[in-house]
Amino acid sequence: MPGLLLGDVFPNFEAETTTGRIKMHDFLGNSWGILFSHPRDFTPVCTTELACAASISEQFRKRDVKMIALSIDSVEDHRNWSKDVMAFAGDQAESPLPFPIIADDKRELSVQLGMLDPDERDKDGMPLTARCVFVIGPDKKLKLSILYPATTGRNFDELLRVIDSLQLTAQKKVATPVNWKPGEKVMVIPSLSDAEAAVHFPQGMTCKELPSGKKYLRYTQL
Ligand code: BEZ
């Protein structure tokens, strides 16, 4: 059964979170959103990830991206775990996590969103959640999904980088090349003719000569 595909409207589920009950679309409002799931509370890799996410939350806020985490434990566990996370992040354990955590102790959302990792199980043999990342656009559609197994922690700098790419390519007819970082040259998308590109990019383009003679590797500086 296919899971959530790019371009699908993100499910407007209701859930209990550390900051109260939410309806996902209301939570997102007109902003971008990022939902990242975790296998379990009080686990080491998850704690490092959430602490990192908390410490760079201002970077997501600046990009108008609402953050929300999910783990298959209760709100009460999430609240207690948040204190460990904030202490690990180097903050006062009493300062609140700067984003909510969804409680999915019945694994309903994890099943609905295709987030279970069949290779990682709890002591009762139940599968844990994988490390999913969903980036949702202001139109509530899925713009990006990444799926890591429970045993591999994510790179949150990479998540900021892909959000920069998504937000740029949502506005301009460009794509970002390998290892692109903000401020570097971007590529003119293949569906744009040279004549159309000249209108969109009056600053000009450079085209890389290739053995095929085809002129498809077109760079521009925004
Ligand atoms: C962790 O967060 O450390 C973790 C959770 C489940 C499986 C492996 C690692």
Image (tube, rainbow, N blue to C red):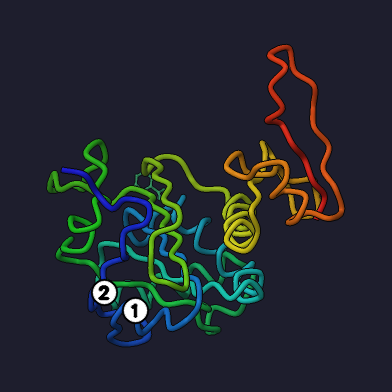
User: Is 202 situated left or right of 94 in this image?
Assistant: right
For the C terminus, which image quadrant?
A: bottom right
Q: Is residue 145 above or below residue 80?
A: above
Say which element carries label 2. Answer: loop
Q: Quadrant of the N terminus?
A: top left
| Amino acid on which disc 2 is placed | Asn
Q: Position of residue 125 (x, y in %)?
A: 13, 44
Mark 1 secondary-structure assignment = helix
**Percent from the top left, x then y, of residue 212?**
68, 14
- CB under 8 Å between discs 1 and 2: yes
Locate residue 97, reporting x and y percent. 50, 77
- Ligand 1 within 8 Å of the CB at mark 2: no
Rate crowding at label 1 as few (under 14), some (14 to 19) or many (20 or more) other CA atoms within 10 Å: some
Q: Nearer the viewer, residue 90 or 2?
A: 2
Q: Residue furthest right?
A: 203
Residue 8 as seen in the image, left or right of residue 54? left
1 or 2: tag closer to the N-terminus: 2
* Res. 38 image quadrant: bottom left
Q: Residue at x 16, y 63 (%)?
A: 108
- Is the residue indicated by label 1 positioned so its CB lies within 8 Å of ligand 1? no
Q: Which residue is mark 1?
A: 25
User: Residue 169, percent across and down?
Assistant: 61, 56
Res. 115 mark: none
Q: Residue furthest top?
A: 211
Q: Residue furthest bottom?
A: 20
Q: Amino acid at mark 1?
A: His
Q: Is residue 184 above or below residue 30?
A: above
- Per the model, the C-alpha gap separating discs 1 and 2 is 5 Å
Task: State the residue at coordinates (56%, 71%).
Answer: 87
Horizontal side of residue 16 vs 136, given as left or right: left
* Residue drawn at 25 percent across, 56 percent down: 113
Q: Which mark is residue 12?
A: 2
